[in-house]
Amino acid sequence: MSTTWPLALNLTAGPVPAAKRRWPRALRIYVGIHSIWLVLYAFLEKGFAYAGWAPFYVSELLVLLGVVALIGTRSLPTLIRTPLGICVSCFLAWQAACTVPYVEEYGIDALRDGALWGYSLFAWVTAALVLRLRGFLHTAVTEHYQRFAQVYLVLGAAAWLASLFFRDALPRWPDTGVSIPLIKGGEYCVHIAGVMAFAFSGLSRKGGWIALIIADAMLGMGVRGGFLAFVVATAFIMLLRPRVQRVLLLAASGLIVVVTMATFDIHFSIPGMSREFSLDQLSDSVNSIVGVSDRQDLEGTKSWRLAWWSTITEYTLNGPYFWQGKGYGVNLADSDGFQVGTREEPLRSPHNSHLTFLARSGVPGFVLWVTVQLLWLGMMLRGYLQASRHRLELWPGFFAWVSAYWLAFAVSASFDVFLEGPMAGIPFWSLFGMGWGGYIPLQHRLQGAYAR
């Protein structure tokens, strides 16, 4: 297989029309289904995640199909032998050890909480598809994602606004309060960050997107974690891919939006929420992130989060749950004493996916989680530097884009129950797998070039 990897990763500016037609039919069907699921999660999010019948929803269907596809690629042994594959395997083994003992006591709740690490299946599946299918990255990135980005800038913003302002008028899934669409600000901002990273990466030549991206991002200003994710990812991609023209366009677009809002005193309230769309809200959100805000609603949720996170670190780092945490299945909000109000779906995990790993799998599980993520990021940055040095067409842009997009996920996951659900968990691990699958054959390609 190694001799065909450079062809499998034909990420070039030109089309690869014949490659897709040679994909095995079953894998081609799976790629189509996986792609549709990702698009629907982005546009409908929770409104799509509830399609199905409890406890079997569309995400469980994709998991089953993913297992079959992974077996069909026959690339699993190759992935396991890589340093990242070994590290991910150790991470999964520990997470399973913190889940299986609790299945008998908590039943479906243990499996549902275990989805936090179970969605990593899609990292293996996506990486295996990259290795197995010729032209996969070209098709997925320079063709399909570019089309998605263009549409998301308009329809994604429309769906986000509809889920805020017209929630009562939208259709709902039977016996639930879940509307279609039902979008969280964190996921929305992360996808806008991904589009911004794509525009700056060099994979797209359409710099005119930037003004619309800035306008869309401002819609999420009331979501502190999501807005911070957008800002951090944008700064990161600008650092990796500095382009004077696009930096100036970004600055001009941002200035125009802010001046327009100030000149016309634009502000409107979001039904059912205490936050509004205005420059005052933007200022309060920024102050709350970097310091102390005068807004009680912002500071109240911030203090609540910090208190819970402190409790988790205390009973793991310095308490009785150092090794295996509290396990998967227990409701952490109830157990830790931080349940909020009367909710149709009680809160189960802290508003920080990283600390959920600490609380549920102890310090070893948390260390393995951090190690996996940092190892992957190191691989992406190494791939970026190698591809830049060897002038490998679109490869530097690819590694820069996946790294910035990943960073947006990681930042947003620090402020919300984020990776625990399929709406963010499946896209996150799919992106992880795409970068992983791209890095492996690139190394063999470069080693072959050095040998010659």
Image (spheres, rainbow, N blue to C red):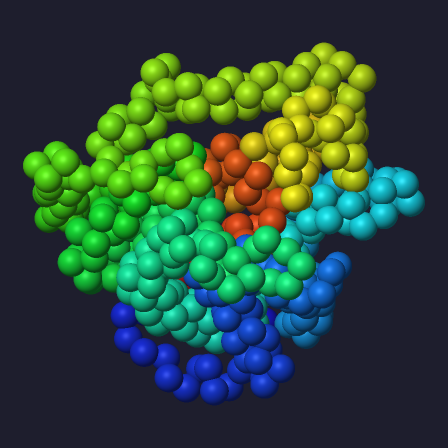
Q: Is residue 242 left or right of residue 159?
A: left
Residue 93 showing in the rendered view? no
The extreme front residue here reads 169
Against 250, residue 321 (above or below) is above
Quadrant of the snapshot with the N terminus: bottom right
The extreme left residue here reads 263
Question: Residue at horizontal 67%, vertical 21%?
Answer: 312
Against 392, residue 277 (above or below) is above
Give the image location of residue 314, x and y in percent.
Answer: 68, 14
Give the image location of residue 54, x and y in percent.
Answer: 73, 60
Against 437, residue 424 (above or below) is above
Camera-side residue: 235 or 110?
Answer: 110
Q: Is residue 263 left or right of residue 106?
A: left
Q: Is residue 67 left or right of residue 140?
A: right
Quadrant of the snapshot with the C terminus: bottom left
Camera-side residue: 88 or 302?
Answer: 302
Question: Residue at horizontal 62%, vertical 29%?
Answer: 340
Residue 143 showing in the rendered view? yes
Against 81, residue 102 (above or below) is above
Question: Residue at horizontal 50%, vertical 32%?
Answer: 415
Camera-side residue: 115 or 121?
Answer: 115
Question: Residue at horizontal 54%, vertical 67%?
Answer: 37
Give the image location of residue 396, x and y in percent.
Answer: 32, 53
Numbered circles on residues, count: 0
The extreme right residue here reads 104
Camera-side residue: 166 or 397?
Answer: 166
Give the image location of residue 160, x and y in percent.
Answer: 39, 53
